[in-house]
Amino acid sequence: MKVVVLGSGVIGVSTAYYLAKAGHEVVVIDRQPEAAMETSFANAGEVSPGYSAPWAGPGMPVKAVKWMLHKHSPLVIRPRIDIYMFRWLYRMLKNCNLSSYRENKARMLRVATYSRDCLEDLRRDTGIAYDERCRGTLQMFRDQKGLDDAAKDVEILKEFGIDHAVLDRAGCIGREPALKHVAEKVAGGLLLPGDETGDCFLFTQRLAELATGLGVTFKHETTVKRLVVEAGRVKHVETSGGLETGEAYVAALGSYTPLLVRPHGIRTQVYPVKGYSVTVPIVDEDGAPVSTMMDEKSKVAITRLGDRIRAAGTAELTGYNMRLSHGRCAMLFHIVQDLFPKGGDLTEVKFWTGLRPMIPDGGPLIGPTRLANLYLNTGHGTLGWTMGPGSGKLLADLLSGRETDIPLDGLTIDRFPQGQGI
């Protein structure tokens, strides 16, 4: 059948690729001139099943207040009259308990570990290359309290069979030798050896090329305006290039998905949370990271991508405002300078910002909606790259009438009430 995929980020392109492999006719529509030009463009580069966890957890409200009082806070809330933001924050607070945290983390781990397996299969089957490295993620703690607090996560990792190791300072330096230059700032760490890194933009662009080879049509520089619905089904999509008709439609527009589906009574609970990244060229191998390191204090990920160092993080609630904040960029620049001062050319820095489609319980949303031929693949938050290939294959299998490799329980919109929300 003909499937129209709305959005050409890593989620949309992965969905299109697997749909085409399953024999469907696929059209992808996106307002940008190429694939992966928005949130997939310059993210942290982490493929991190082991680090997949909801932001909402025990103690998060207290942490959030403390963060916002700090100069280099990982969280910023810009005051604005926005009922959707207030509802999102309220629902996130309701998930800040141990029971919800465990349930939500289990859901996220299920998709993330499956997606990593799909990514491995893609590499083997297609030879796709994207500055990938399979050397794990190091969650680094600057003090003993942080290391002690990680015990809760360690228990959950054990419960779900996620490979991990608790490291002392010497162990951290053994995994990331450049930390020897700032050893006094390292108390210990949690190693997640099954995690990977890679350039999400490069991956998505090359997967789009493979999808094109399978017959997928990409219609770029085409804005999706609205869904036209008739008798409980999408009749067609109205775009800046005219009407696009298919037998099924997939909304994979990231943070913009709720704007498209809300007029039809579909409440996704997705809200945009702005993140930032800085990228610098490597000038000294001895001072550069070898994989991904998460600085737990600042919640900033620092990743080795080929001949570049990228630092990404921060969470800014400011609606759909895409203005680049110099203060947020300076915070990331400071972290790179603080932990890897010798590795990169800090005079050649590139700044970027993008909107993460966040759901209060951690997301994502994969599956059908109240409209018979409309499906969602959105709400992956900071883990779109981690969950991308797996999410695409899940939706392709669902549309193809196949049994999915992992259950969709808790991943569909059925987990949210549809009478109210965002």
Image (cartoon, rainbow, N blue to C red):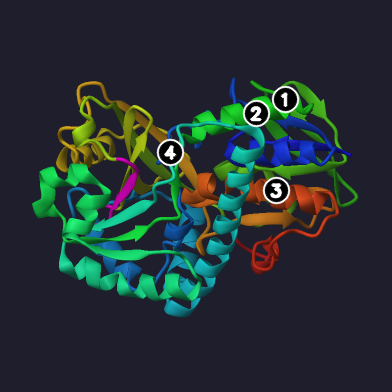
* Secondary structure of the residue carrying numbered label 2: helix
Q: Position of residue 104 (x, y in %)?
A: 52, 68
Q: Which residue is mark 1?
A: 212
Eye-nearest disc, 2 or 4: 2
Q: CA distance from mark 4 to mark 1?
A: 24 Å
Counting residues from the start of the chain, the first of labels 1 and 3 encountered is 1
> Dot 4, how many residues are within 10 Å of its Cα: few (below 14), some (14-19), or many (20+)?
many
**Residue 207 % position (x, y):** 63, 31
Q: Dot 1: few (<14), some (14–19), or many (≥20) neighbours within 10 Å?
A: some
Circle 1 SS class? helix
Q: 245 and 1: which one is in front?
A: 1
* Tag 3 residue: 393
Residue identifier under label 4: 43
Does residue 295 appear to the left or right of 342 in the view shown?
right
Q: Position of residue 80 (x, y in %)?
A: 39, 49
Q: Nearer the viewer, mark 4 or mark 1?
A: 1
Give the residues in magenta: 290-298
